[in-house]
Amino acid sequence: MDKYVIKGGTPLVGEVEIGGAKNAALAILTAAIMTDEPVTIDNIPDVSDINVLLEAISVIGATVDRIDRHTAVINGVTIGSVEVEYEYIKKIRASYYLLGALLGKYKRAEVPLPGGCNIGSRPIDQHLKGFRALGAEVEIRSGNIIAEAKYLHGAHIFMDMVSVGATINIMMAAALADGNTIIENAAREPHVVDVANFLNCMGANIKGAGTDVIRIRGVKSLHKCSYTIVPDMIEAGTYMFAAAATRGDVLVKNVIPKHLEAMTAKLQEIGCDVEEFDDAVRVTCRQRLGRTHVKTLPYPGFPTDMQPQMSVVLALARGTSIVTESIFENRFKYADELMRMGANIKIEGNTAIIDGVERLSGARISAPDLRAGAALVIAGLAADGYTVVDDIVYIQRGYEDFPGKLRSIGAEISQVSEEKEIQKFRMREVI
Ligand code: EPZ
């Protein structure tokens, strides 16, 4: 299995370009099959989750032309099945967006029930509640969700909790329902807005995305369009926090600063300089950072997908910090690995109590999930000595060319597959 090997201690300095948002692209590439005309999408991140999803939609019969790493043309006219194979749901939960897309377009969908994952049980009851409200019969049979409707009608749906996936899935199905749908307590994330903008680009009639009330006026059909995915706020935040952890000076380009405000505010609060430009932010850290309290919340609050990266920065800060994870029930799995690097972090329920230490030391660690893996790479970049990160397949799900982008801002990091390559990496300094 491939690994990253890192020589820590070098401040990150330079410029890094951010790609398209994985969590917008997964939904938008799925929604693209809802028309029988060609849809061109660019600024797609070249990460493994996207490649698995594109495979899943081609297996049900859609045509998928990869024009280049970041551009695809999709046409749903050739779809021959509304049954999604288990292997795709097992690989990426977001395949469940095919429920909303296929139910909206064909009034029938059969998708395996996604299991839990590394960060929590992640039920999908809110998705099913929305589909039923739109008039679909939904049942679970032999591990599959079977949703079908003679026709879908508008509904007034109040979400029991803020859910990004359920908001997007219901929005897709409602786009082709008869009548008006209102989603109350809707998720407001930028990628929810991007999906709504994309559906409108295909001829849907959706208003209010980005607020907690989304209004959808159903249309008869959707048409072709060309669309560019929004920049990835979590990829951007990951590089911002890497700059902070290594006391560097990094210009993070191709971002929407407004989407980064919760992260910017926290970095400024603990002592970083963050300068905002039209489509970039510059993070400069000149001294040891201070402590703070952070609680993850739905957007515009501090994002749960940046919680591990925040904890790594606070592990090196002066004083005691508290990080509370309010979205998922099992998102501190990186804490044990961080303690092996010398961090002083105590987990109590959904809270991490972090006593900052002066230094971290490199160690052999393993990525427990996507964002925790990225955070542990940041820890390795900030630590003294060498770090080897195993199970990097998790990180490759959501970060395009992570080592290459980090090297471009001064990091000493390589992707290796053999143990002997690790020795070679360590020896290159000595030679
Ligand atoms: C999306 O997951 C993202 N994934 C996650 O990013 C992100 O952490 C999460 O939103 C929150 O922002 C994608 O977009 C592919 P939710 P999603 O539905 O939609 C509970 C990453 O690292 N819930 O907003 O699954 C759920 O268990 C990934 O890129 C229900 O109880 O998240 C959780 O506690 C990790 N019932 C909370 O709501 C439901 O029907 C928020 O989940 C749905 C959700």
Image (spheres, helix red, strand yellow):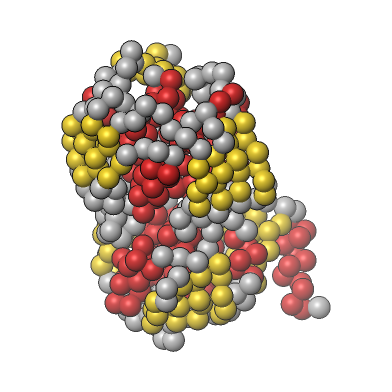
* Res. 409 visible in picture: yes
Please tell me whether residue 398 is drawn above or below residue 278 in the rendered image: above
| Residue lying at 60% horizontally and 68% vertically, measured from the top left | 406
Q: Is residue 196 left or right of residue 359?
A: left
The foreground one among 409 and 26 is 26
| Residue lying at 19% horizontally and 40% vertically, measured from the top left | 184
Q: Is residue 68 left or right of residue 191?
A: right
| Residue lying at 30% horizontally and 60% vertically, measured from the top left | 302
Q: Is residue 407 left or right of residue 315?
A: right
| Residue lying at 37% horizontally and 34% vertically, measured from the top left | 172
Count of numbered circles in the view? 0
Please tell me whether residue 90 is drawn above or below residue 109 in the rendered image: below
Residue 332 x %, y % = 38, 53
Residue 230 x %, y % = 45, 55
The foreground one among 123 and 276 is 276
Residue 308 x %, y % = 41, 59
Residue 29 x %, y % = 51, 40
